[in-house]
Image (spheres, rainbow, N blue to C red):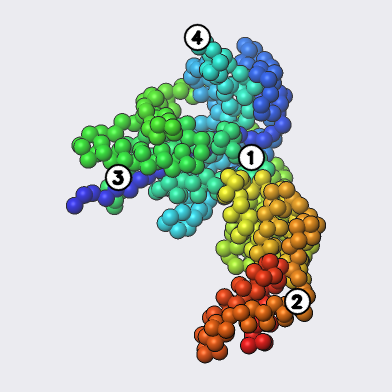
Amino acid sequence: MSKQYEMVIGLEVHVELATKTKIFCGCPTEFGKEPNTHVCPVCTGMPGALPVLNRSVVDYALALGAATHCLVNKLCRFDRKNYFYPDNPQNYQISQLYLPICHDGWVEIDGAAGRRRIRIHEMHMEEDAGKLVHDAWEDSSLVDFNRSGVPLIEIVSEPDLRDASEVIAYLEKLRSICRYLGISDCKLQEGSMRADVNLSVRELGSKTLGVRTEMKNLNSFKAITRAIAAERERQIELLEEGKIVLQETRRWDDNKEYSYAMRSKEDARDYRYFPDPDLPPVLIDDEWMGQVHSRQPEMQEQKIGRYLSEYQLPYEDARLITDSRCVAELFEETVKLCGQPKKAANWLTGETTRLLKENGMEAEDICFSPENLAELIQLVEKGELNNQNAKKVFEAMFTQNVKPQAYMEAHGLKTVIDNDLLEKTVAAVLAANPKTVDEYRSGKTKVIGFLVGQVMKQMRGKADPAAVNRQITEQL
Ligand SMILES: [Zn+2]
């Protein structure tokens, strides 16, 4: 029998913070500007320039730490991580090694193995490097320092993850938390969230860890899933052949679906870390922590609890809606306007989710207003829109935020509440289908569905199916 293996995965996640200015200077962090326009002596590493810590970066890190149940190092410090690379003008990166701001936290995720708690080893603040541009010239690369000094938080997990579904769930959780806190938009494609995957395999049941590799350059959930599957295969193949897995950093090429070795993995000692002499230690007192806690918004867990009791929503609805703060806010506003929590939840978990997926959009891209969703729900309640036409109106609302009532009227989707017409149509349909009528009368009541369909067709879908059903039963 062939051996069974399991993966042991830990993640290093970098989140780019949405502060207005950089971590150690006053340059703006805005993305997509002309190269080297948001720079100064500090973020280009000029000799003698002195860094000054941006207090917002600490605020954001503390907020994230609080939301992920971390402990805080009330005295934390910055260290220099020494390495040479052309996008790093100082030849060192200011980061944290010895006293990172937060440590020993956790988040809960729902993956293939059900709900599990993933431990966070530590969280530290650091500065981003510049960006090399290779494409435009054949014989040279250029460097853009706009990104140099943009604040990052690195979140290091314990090796608690066991498969790709858990890795994605963990990243989605971190992204959701950061967006709730408003500290980052966490877009993998744009690099405001980056994940390095540390992965090893071992025989199922074994307690010792295998040799791990680190994979970089993973800029979508799909790429992460494919890279994990490929690396698992590669390592198992080596082990089965009696070879060893080398501890190294590998770069994933998503087009070729293949990873290749970049360099042997460095240890912390390779970087010759030492405390940065230009930056004083950061002392976080109770008053500062108090301010952070008082600013903390209602997070997902609290919202779920409230939705269960206040709106009597099923757990799954509450969870789906609160996955993103903007959907939760849309829901709460809609309920305020129409007083129909379950109906609002149905639209947000059903059609909204379907259309987001179909259009490759994220919850943050939703453009329809709570006023319009409330209006749509009321039109259905009043019987002016049947479910089928309500979906058509919703789709228009989803893409263009149209006013439901106006759209319904302009497109002739309003349900006909003309009882005379309904009576006549039903009579005509029954007369035209004597066989089905006989079947119904002999006890095959299921055939009523066919008759309802015929009437709806005659009335061009503008009747209320429930009313049609009632009318047919009456006439039979
Ligand atoms: Zn600067």
As drawn, 148 above or below 113: above
Residue depicted at 28% across the width and 41% down the height: 236
Tell me how far mark 2 sits from mark 4, CA to CA.
Answer: 79 Å
Tell me how far mark 3 sits from mark 1, CA to CA.
Answer: 36 Å
Say which residue label 3 marks. 202
Quadrant containing the C terminus is bottom right
Between circles 3 and 4, the one closer to the viewer is 4
As drawn, 13 above or below 172: above
As drawn, 167 above or below 341: above
> Which one is in front, 49 or 397?
397
Q: Is residue 280 visible?
A: no
Question: Position of 141 compared to 282: left or right?
Answer: left
* Amino acid identity at mark 1: Asp
Element marked by disc 1 = loop
Tell me how far mark 1 sits from mark 2, CA to CA.
Answer: 54 Å
* Amino acid identity at mark 3: Arg
Say which residue label 1 marks. 185
Return the disc, 3 or 1, that comes first in the chain's sequence. 1
Tell me how far mark 1 sits from mark 4, CA to CA.
Answer: 35 Å
Between circles 2 and 4, the one closer to the viewer is 2
Question: Position of 356 compared to 206: left or right?
Answer: right
